[in-house]
Amino acid sequence: MRQIDAAHMNASSTSRPAVVSWLGYGGLLPFVGAALVCWFEPNHRGWWLELLLGYGAVILSFVGALHWGFAMVHPGAAGRPMNGMYAWSVVPSLLGWLALLAHPAAGATLLIAGFLAHYRQDLRLARVLPLPAWYVPLRLQLTVVACLCLATVYLVKDSMPVQHPAHANRCQMDWFVVMGSQDACGASRSVG
């Protein structure tokens, strides 16, 4: 495997590779799509919010993993070990996991806070590592759009389910729980 000269990479990468643009902006499509559908398809809004928050948690985990990779590639950057970067790299996935357990508004808040905190970490990282010149501006653009889409949760909150959307179909999933002649949701069903 070929060694990458980090100084050369930084100096020669002022223009963003096309594949990075396609994948970065293409990765916003699920955010934008789910946020728009929340507005225009209110009958299944809980499901669309679950999709939006789930995708947000996955992407937040992904951006956290970038810092793990940077720490591996630059183990002694700025003359010190990258232990803090390794530690930070797992925080976004933990925030994403907690966001999935919370009510949609609280989950969206955690994800937005996670994306903003991670962008701040990207700025700190850019001061100590030779990153491509396009990296931080791209991260800002992607972060802003993701956070605005997640903020959709606050705008549709009046019609959100009281319980977390992941639990909305609990009645259908608990088919094996039967209390007398009623299922876990209290609906009558024939037994036997």
Image: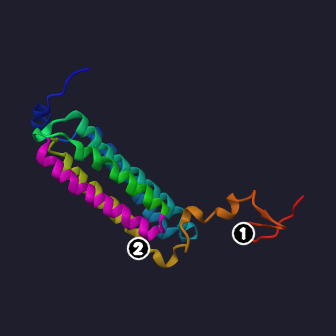
- Does residue 53 appear to the left or right of 75 in the view shown? right
Q: Residue furthest right?
A: 192
* Residue 96 locus on image (x, y percent): 41, 56
Residue 94, horizontal then vertical, whole percent: 39, 54
Along the polypeptide, which appears first: circle 2 or circle 1? Answer: 2
Q: Mark on residue 120?
A: none
The three-letter amino acid code for the residue at tag 1 is Cys
Q: Secondary structure at mark 1?
A: loop
At x 43% / y 61%, what residue is drawn? Answer: 99
In the image, farthest residue toward the bottom: 158
Q: Position of residue 173 (x, y in %)?
A: 68, 58
- Image check: 65 left or right of 47? left
Which residue is found at the position 18% from the left and 46% from the top? Answer: 134
Residue nearest the observer in this picture, 106 or 133:
106
103 within the magenta span: yes
Q: Position of residue 35 (x, y in %)?
A: 43, 64
CA distance for labels 2 and 1: 28 Å
In terms of secondary structure, what is the magenta stretch mainly? helix
Q: Residue furthest top?
A: 1
Which residues are drawn in magenta? 102-130
Q: Is residue 151 left or right of residue 74?
A: right
Q: Amino acid at mark 2?
A: Tyr
Q: Which residue is mark 1?
A: 185
Q: Quadrant of the N terminus?
A: top left
Q: Secondary structure at mark 2?
A: helix
Crowding around mark 1 (Cα neighbors within 10 Å: few <14, some 14 to 19, many 20+) is some
Front-most of 38 and 118? 118
Q: What's the residue at 17%, 53% (across, down)?
A: 123
Give the residue at mark 2.
154
